[in-house]
Amino acid sequence: MRRFIIVGVACVLALASLSVVPSAQQSNALTAAATALGAANIKSLQYTGSGANFSVGQNFTPNDPWPRVTVKSYTASINYDTGSMRLELLREMGTTMPRGGGAPFTGEQRQIQVVSGTYAWNVPVAPPAPAGGAPAAGGGGRGGAPPPAPAPAAAVERMLAMWATPQGFVKAAMTNNATERKAGGGTEVSFTVGGKYKMTGTINAQNQVERVRTWIDQPIVGDMLVETVYSGYKDFGGVMFPSRIAQTQDGYPSLDLTIASVTANPAVDIAVPDNVRAFQPPPVRVESQKMADGVYYLTGGTHHSLAVEMKDHIVLVDTPNDETRALAVIAKTKEVIPSKPIRYLVTSHHHWDHLGGIRAAIDEGATIVTHQTNKAFIERAAKTVHTLNPDRLSTSKKAVKIQTVGEVGKLTDGTRTIELYNITGYEHTADMMMIYLPKEKILAEADAFSPPATPTTSVVVSAVPYAAALYDNIQRRKLDVQTITPFHGGRTTDVAEVARNAGKSATTAQ
């Protein structure tokens, strides 16, 4: 869901190694906090807890909170001297996902997220051992574990999260010429990391870091506020640390932890894997597949789009991920359908991974066709401030044009018609639209069914709920669909395969 944040990552290097040496300008508040929290003596830190994290950017409607996922255990291991952190989470989900998005799973899910300096990566977790106790086969070849997965887009967020911890914030403030002012019965401390990333914290009368605010770049909402509130400080074996951590992103809860234990100066040795150090993000690739005269399926990444030629213009469906992907999709659209403007950009739904390039479409001058519940969010996206990573719309400042759709919508030039239908009974999102071309009998959809590499040929044991919603809506609308172009997955599919995955028999309505 995050784009590659390469520009600005180097700014975080300034925090890779810190020593707590207060400057002459710093008041007693910051030095008192350093003493109370033992910041000078804490070189590394580990804390454990439990609670919940939330699927940011995947709410059911644009006004709902992010979907909640239970976190059975959470362990953060930090080495402040080397600027590195390892997070281990054990998440748990019942048989029903909460309303909204996020990668679906049931049972337990273990995640390991690491950052060191400008490098970030995820550690693949081996599947549970099969019955009998034999170890599961690894995915890295010759029985080895899969290699670490580079995650450069997460580097800045994870690094800022490390320095937003109470002891980390004090260390960073004391080495980055922080300014201080009295505010709200406490002291507000502010500084900038590497000249780019601002951090502001509140130190209360008890010399505790009570709140930390920082901002990260997000393609849609711009300079996004990440705010962490610390409360219930107590002595954990000689370390003063909050017993509760509550974080919000873009105003909604993103992390809520109750802390169980804290250990000062444990051994935390994090080495950057060779493949992570050598990793270079591949160039953005957009491939086109002609589905019918003037209809092109645009693939080549994790998210796909659809371009439809009309008499004197183009209708493009989805500019996903971020501005870079969106601009590449727009360029490919103009290549396969030359000499016509992109007049309309249809959004399949509001989730951030599919809407990430919306500002590029606005800058292109396209009218945004979206479900009526998204109008205010699109208007907000068009006006958000992007100082951390300015985009084209930041310069052009073009006004957004919006055309809303309710349960049913239509775009036509008198010859070709594009029908838009809101998918009902769908717990993933309330505003999902399927895009149907009746003449060509092509239907485009996002997230409801993403076909696996190998087509399914028999009824699945466990029905896919989203596939069932897609199938039911196709039948309810009596759509004659021959080809489905999903916005995830590596191939097209058909109603029969959707029906099998929905645990139903396909009887496509004519």
Image (cartoon, helix red, strand yellow):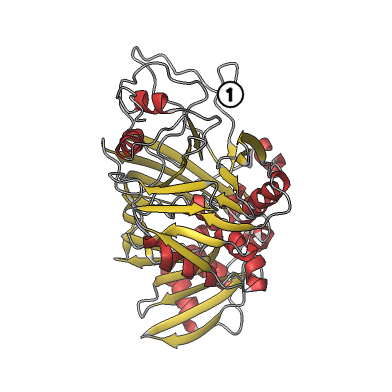
Q: Is 505 left, or right, of 47 in this rendering?
A: left
Question: Where, by quadrant of the figure, is residue 191 drawn?
Answer: bottom right
Residue at 30% across, 48% down: 99
Residue 390 in view of the camera: no
Q: Position of residue 338 (x, y in %)?
A: 73, 49
Residue at 57% across, 51% down: 316
Q: Position of residue 420 (x, y in %)?
A: 43, 49
Question: Where, by quadrant of the figure, is residue 364 drawn?
Answer: bottom right
> Is residue 6 placed above or below 200 in the rendered structure?
above
Residue at 45% across, 58% down: 370
Q: Is 21 left, or right, of 33 in this rendering?
A: right
Q: Position of residue 365 (x, y in %)?
A: 62, 65
Badge 1 local density, few (<14 within 10 Å), some, or many (20+)? few
Q: Which residue is mark 1?
A: 140
Label 1 amino acid? Gly
Comparing 141 with 321, the one in front is 321
Residue at 41% across, 33% down: 480
